[in-house]
Amino acid sequence: MGISTALATYWYFHLPNFILAALMYTLLGRVLLGLMVDADSPNYIWRFFCRITDPVVAAVAVMTPKVTPPVLIWLFGFVWLFWLRVAFHYTLLLFNLAPRIGGAAS
């Protein structure tokens, strides 16, 4: 099975996994960049990171105490997205829908 065939066959795994990973690492980038720039910085990279991750931050902020600093909310978002990816992969493995290493059948 070629790479393009595997990607097309398991699109329902790769697409959500890619989106969750991109959000997760963008949140991590927001944390690291937040150490160097102000919260209201006009930097276009900072604005992009904020715009992409604000929905995740808002969802995490609903479930965390209001006294939590923004940087911790961003880190909680990173961790929660990681565990969401793990749960997603595990669920697909349970239903035998996830891709296997080397194309091994179970």
Image (cartoon, rainbow, N blue to C red):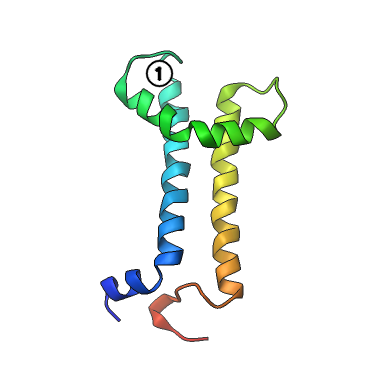
Q: Residue at x 30, y 23 (%)?
A: 44
The residue depicted at 55 percent of the width and 32 percent of the height is: 57
Q: Position of residue 74 (x, y in %)?
A: 55, 31
All told, the count of numbered labels is 1
Going by the image, does 95 lie left or right of 105?
right
Vertical comparison of 13 with 66: above or below = below
Crowding near the residue tagged with mark 1, few <14, some 14–19, many ≥20 C-alpha atoms within 10 Å: few
The residue located at (40%, 81%) in the rendering is 103
Q: Position of residue 6 (x, y in %)?
A: 34, 74
Q: Tell me where residue 95 sits by quadrant.
A: bottom right
**Residue located farthest toward the right when viewing the structure as drawn:** 65
Q: Kindly state the secondary structure of the residue where label 1 is placed.
A: loop
Where does the image place residue 26, in percent across and percent down from the top left? Answer: 42, 38
Q: Residue at x 70, y 31 (%)?
A: 64
The residue under label 1 is 36
Corner quadrant of residue 17: bottom left
Q: Quadrant of the N terminus?
A: bottom left
